[in-house]
Image (cartoon, helix red, strand yellow):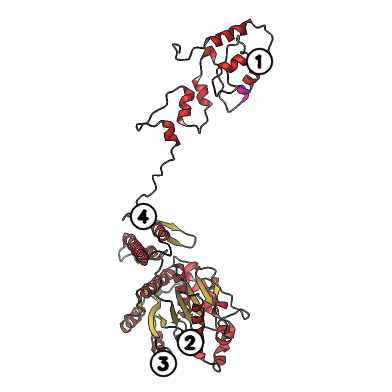
């Protein structure tokens, strides 16, 4: 039964206890000492709210009756309510912050709230929070992307493509993987098309916008695997056309895009090995041991530390005398071909094998052309490069007639392109006119970053992936991969 002020009225037991306390002599009892100590502890405690102060003329109840009058769940140190009432503010202050709403309602004397669905508020508090940011329609046609900036450059983080790849896995059906790749490419193209194109009066802004589109379309994209492992000889009898630079950067771009690539350094200078950060001093097992001593190719291959899935068979200075030593050996023109075939039979197949040749037509270059079925020719956008190209094509015809009937020119890449000069445009047009099917759409511009990268033992793909040279090589590698997957090699 409650009083007029809403507080519960103390029962007869409490009144009897109070009467007995008044009749007790003034001397302190053990129970009073305990009550005083409890009150002192409550006053000194900084974390608990002080309870209501009891009448100074009333003594504490005996322990037995106090235990009966104390509500269940209250501690011994709780202060006795004045006039038989309960201080709701003190009770609410003692409820922990992480308690449910039902506990808070019970402590304050309120009626628990009931939700419209029939459940109590306490049940609603115990339910886990709903994350409204979760995209429940991940297969929606509206695809959102997040572009993060990494330490080395701007990298596209395609979360939807990554989720699709995780769901499909390596054992997924080819049709499902093909559908996911087409969907990813369409999404990238749509996002790139949304970037505005500045006018012709701002060439720098146009270049920046174009580079942003290329980053969106290429960075983070997984290139398709070829129908069968592709072996390409990167050759040009003219030096200084970007042959070694093209070899290592295209291989790095393929490896970064999910393919397994191998670079075989057949140039005695060992520049490709240097660019990949591979140790190639005289005592290191190298491609010389494979050609002359018959060492297994897998025994000399080293992984590239800066790019995953990229490997290199280094060249040492010993390779400079290999051509003389090969003259007296049996099957001297096909020793590299047999080494690559033996590695494939042992279950270590690569998606792409790029062979960097010296700028001459000797036994090393002939070995490379016999081992490969395709010739990859980088051409500098100058007229001197065109003169060397005609001689290279004659030598390719000789090797095809006598040693390797499947050899053909499959890819031509224009390098060191300078869009400010008419000469570069004229050379590019002439090469495209004579080789319309072989020339890639991409041209590699002159770039300081491409020249700086080898001095740090890196390719430009890791040295500065946001540079124009890195984007050009990544785009060229993508064209090669698309051709290989379509069987147009």
Q: Which residue is mark 3?
A: 398
Q: Of marks 3 and 4, which one's residue comes earlier in the chain?
A: 4
User: Residue 326, how many percent across, how many down?
Assistant: 55, 91
- Rounded to the nearest whole Å, what is the CA distance between mark 4 and mark 2? 49 Å
User: Residue 67, how many percent across, how many down?
Assistant: 59, 18
Helix, strand, or loop for circle 2? helix
Asked if 350 appears above or below 466 in the picture, the reply is: below
Q: Of marks 1 and 3, which one's residue comes earlier in the chain?
A: 1
Q: Residues within 10 Å of mark 1 (few under 14, many from 20)?
A: some
Identified at 46% across, 67% down, the residue is 256
Q: Which residue is mark 2?
A: 365
* Number of the label disc, if any, that sits on residue 60: none
Q: Of marks 2 and 3, which one's residue comes earlier in the chain?
A: 2
Q: Which residue is mark 4?
A: 144
The answer to whether residue 419 of the structure is visible from this angle is no
- Rounded to the nearest whole Å, what is the CA distance between mark 3 and mark 4? 54 Å
Question: Looking at the image, do the residues carrying marks 4 and 1 touch, with CB atoms under 8 Å apart?
Answer: no
Question: Looking at the image, do the residues carrying marks 3 and 4 touch, with CB atoms under 8 Å apart?
Answer: no
* Number of the label disc, if any, that sits on residue 31: 1
Q: Which residues are magenta?
A: 40-45
């Amino acid at each position: 039964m409650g009083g007029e002020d809403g507080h519960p009225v103390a029962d007869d037991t409490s009144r009897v206890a109070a009467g007995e306390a008044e009749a007790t002599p003034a001397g302190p009892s053990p129970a009073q000492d305990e009550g005083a100590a409890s009150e002192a502890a409550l006053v000194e405690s900084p974390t608990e709210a002080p309870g209501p102060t009891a009448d100074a003329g009333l003594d504490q109840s005996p322990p037995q009756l106090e235990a009966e009058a104390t509500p269940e769940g209250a501690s011994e140190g709780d202060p006795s309510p004045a006039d038989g009432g309960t201080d709701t503010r003190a009770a609410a202050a003692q409820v922990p912050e992480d308690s449910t709403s039902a506990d808070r309602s019970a402590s304050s004397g309120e009626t628990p709230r009931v939700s419209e669905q029939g459940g109590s508020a306490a049940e609603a508090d115990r339910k886990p929070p709903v994350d409204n940011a979760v995209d429940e329609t991940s297969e929606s046609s509206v695809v959102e992307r997040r572009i993060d900036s990494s330490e080395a450059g701007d990298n596209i983080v395609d979360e939807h493509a990554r989720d699709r790849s995780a769901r499909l896995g390596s054992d997924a059906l080819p049709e499902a993987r093909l559908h996911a790749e087409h969907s990813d490419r369409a999404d990238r193209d749509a996002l790139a098309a949304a970037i505005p194109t500045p006018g012709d009066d701002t060439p720098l802004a146009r270049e920046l916008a174009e580079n942003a589109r290329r980053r969106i379309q290429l960075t983070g994209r997984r290139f398709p695997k070829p129908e069968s492992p592709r072996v390409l000889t990167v050759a040009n009898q003219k030096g200084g056309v970007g042959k070694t630079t093209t070899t290592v950067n295209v291989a790095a771009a393929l490896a970064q895009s999910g393919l397994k690539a191998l670079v075989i350094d057949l140039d005695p200078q060992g520049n490709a090995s240097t660019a990949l950060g591979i140790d190639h001093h005289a005592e290191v097992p190298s491609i010389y041991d494979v050609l002359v001593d018959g060492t297994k190719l897998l025994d000399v291959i080293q992984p590239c530390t800066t790019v995953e899935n990229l490997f290199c068979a280094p060249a040492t200075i010993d390779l400079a005398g290999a051509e003389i030593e090969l003259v007296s050996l049996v099957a001297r023109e096909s020793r590299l071909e047999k080494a690559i075939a033996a590695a494939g039979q042992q279950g270590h197949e690569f998606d792409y094998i790029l062979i960097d040749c010296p700028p001459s037509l000797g036994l090393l270059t002939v070995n490379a052309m016999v081992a490969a079925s395709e010739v990859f020719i980088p051409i500098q956008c100058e007229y001197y490069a065109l003169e060397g190209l005609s001689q290279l094509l004659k030598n390719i015809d000789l090797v095809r007639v006598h040693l390797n009937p499947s050899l053909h020119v499959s890819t031509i890449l224009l390098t060191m392109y300078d869009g400010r000069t008419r000469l570069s445009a004229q050379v590019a047009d002439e090469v495209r006119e004579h080789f319309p099917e072989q020339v890639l759409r991409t041209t590699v511009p002159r770039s300081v970053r491409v020249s700086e990268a080898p001095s740090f033992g890196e390719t430009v793909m890791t040295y500065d992936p946001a540079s124009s040279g890195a984007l050009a090589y990544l785009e060229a590698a993508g064209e090669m991969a698309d051709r290989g997957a379509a069987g147009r090699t």
